[in-house]
Amino acid sequence: MPTRHYQPSMFDSETHVLNLFEAEIEYLPEFYRSEPAWSLFEGISQQTQWQQDRLTVYGKEHLAPRLSCWFGEPWMDYTYSNHTMRASRLTPLLLEIKEKIETHSGNRFNSVLVNYYRDGQDSNGWHSDDEPELGDNPIIASLSLGAPRDFHLRHKVDPSLKHKMSLEHGSLLMMRGQTQSRWQHHIPKRAKADGRINLTFRTILRR
């Protein structure tokens, strides 16, 4: 493998592409403008049947530090951290968001994991969206609504390669290529934060 000289990550001023080794990540800070994004936040908050899952990590079971709901077709069970989520039907509001993201990205999605971070103590540990049902090099479209939260990335092989950014209200993060196989990401806790809803659209493959 040729030697790569890593420089601090930055956004291209025109395309908003992260300059990260072995990753394809695009960030759109105002995919939705503020007022429409708040309308989506309120609508999703009211229409979603939130649940707090029990996850198994390193052999220990604990409550997930956030609320969530999984949407897709009835056959689209989704398993992570030894927990299987049963799919709810995509609502008209989620379908509207999905279509907008598909039009922008040129990619099709058939499911979405919706997470609700109630305050700064809710979080998401280090992980990759690389479950078998997503296939090789999955495309993940992540929409953020509500309070901004830090988003950390680290390379799986070279821990010196890392990046931190803020996911803003109404922003869209697109992750493609080797991003999930070569990188991990997480949302850390913070001292104070209002509510945030995150939607990660993805494509589940039939087995």
Image (cartoon, helix red, strand yellow):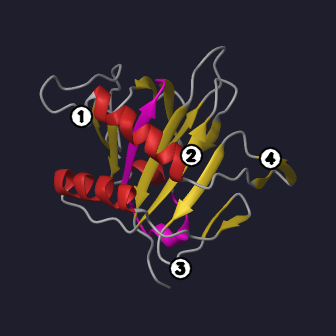
Residue 34 in the image, given as x and y percentages of width and height: 30, 27
Q: Which residue is mark 1?
A: 17
Check whether the beta carbons of the residues at disc 1 and disc 3 lie within 8 A of each other. Answer: no
Whichever of labels 1 and 4 marks the residue nearer the N terminus, that label is 1
Where residue 38 appears, as percent x and y from the top left, is 38, 32
The local secondary structure at tag 3 comes to loop
Q: Viewed as shown, does residue 103 lie left or right of 157? A: left
Q: Is residue 38 above or below residue 143?
A: above
Q: Is residue 206 above or below residue 35?
A: below
- As measured in the structure, the alpha-carbon distance from the residue carrying label 1 to the one carrying label 3 is 35 Å
> Relative to residue 30, is residue 115 drawn left or right?
right
- Secondary structure at numbered mark 4: strand
Q: Is residue 3 visible?
A: no
Task: Please give the range of residues in magenta.
Answer: 130-148
Between disc 2 and disc 1, the foreground one is: 2
Q: Residues within 10 Å of mark 3 (few under 14, many from 20)?
A: few
Residue 74, numbered circle = 3
Asked if one can make out residue 43 in the rendered structure from this viewpoint, the answer is yes
Q: CA distance from mark 2 to mark 1?
A: 25 Å
Please, what is the three-letter code of the amino acid marked with disc 2?
A: Asn
From the image, tell me which residue sits under label 4: 63
55 is within the stretch colored magenta: no
Question: Between marks 2 and 3, how big is the CA–CA gap?
Answer: 19 Å
